[in-house]
């Protein structure tokens, strides 16, 4: 299978969790961008619009709620956002920012890859 044309942006402040997500996705053939918080994520988006954003909610400097609001006001993009959170009610966190999906931590590799496949079709 060919890699998607557009990258997945992993926004996660925990360096170990971010590395796990990046390794899983690159191992599955995805091109991955990464950011430790919302500020870095906006810098990444300014350089290249990703095809999908995997967004943690609780981060320093700029959290997931602030990032989602700023991202949508700046770019009015159809780029899907999937909330990745350890919060007890991941669906509620996703609803708060009108996300396109959610993934509860801890997650299985298959669940992460399915969430990405659902929102970022692979190139032919």
Image (cartoon, helix red, strand yellow):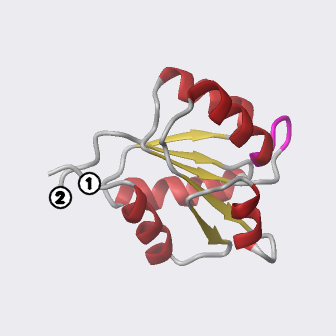
Instruction: Tell me what residue is drawn at x 80 percent, y 70 percent.
Output: 87
Q: Please identify the quadrant where the N terminus is shown.
A: bottom left
- Rate crowding at label 2 as few (under 14), some (14 to 19) or many (20 or more) other CA atoms within 10 Å: few
Do the residues bearing badges 1 and 2 touch, measured as CB atoms within 8 Å?
yes
Image mark for residue 96: none
- Labels 1, 2: front one: 1
Q: Is residue 10 magenta?
A: no
Q: Main secondary structure of the magenta part?
A: loop
Stretch in magenta: 60-64
- Rate crowding at label 1 as few (under 14), some (14 to 19) or many (20 or more) other CA atoms within 10 Å: some
| 30 with respect to 72 (left or right) | left
Residue 52 visible, this angle: yes
- Asked where in the image residue 89 lies, by quadrant, the reply is bottom right
- Does 108 sit above or below residue 55? below
Q: Position of residue 54 (x, y in %)?
A: 57, 53
Instruction: Tell me what residue is drawn at x 42 percent, y 67 percent.
Output: 113
Q: Which residue is mark 1?
A: 122
Residue 37 visible, this angle: no
Q: Which residue is mark 2?
A: 1
Instruction: Tell me what residue is drawn at x 76 percent, y 54 percent.
Output: 57
- Does 48 sit above or below residue 56? above
Q: Is residue 62 magenta?
A: yes
Q: Nearer the viewer, residue 16 or 69?
A: 69
Callout 2 secondary element: loop
């Amino acid at each position: 299978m060919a890699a998607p044309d557009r990258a997945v942006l992993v926004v996660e402040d925990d360096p170990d969790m971010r590395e796990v997500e990046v390794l899983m996705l690159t191992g599955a053939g995805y091109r991955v961008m990464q950011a430790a918080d919302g500020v870095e994520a906006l810098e990444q988006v300014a350089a290249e619009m990703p095809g999908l954003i995997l967004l943690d909610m609780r981060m320093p400097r700029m959290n997931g709620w602030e990032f989602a609001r700023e991202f949508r006001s700046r770019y009015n993009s159809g780029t899907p956002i999937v909330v990745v959170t350890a919060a007890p009610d991941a669906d509620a966190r996703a609803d708060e920012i009108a996300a396109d999906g959610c993934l509860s931590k801890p997650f299985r590799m298959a669940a992460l890859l399915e969430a990405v496949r659902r929102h970022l079709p692979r190139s032919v």
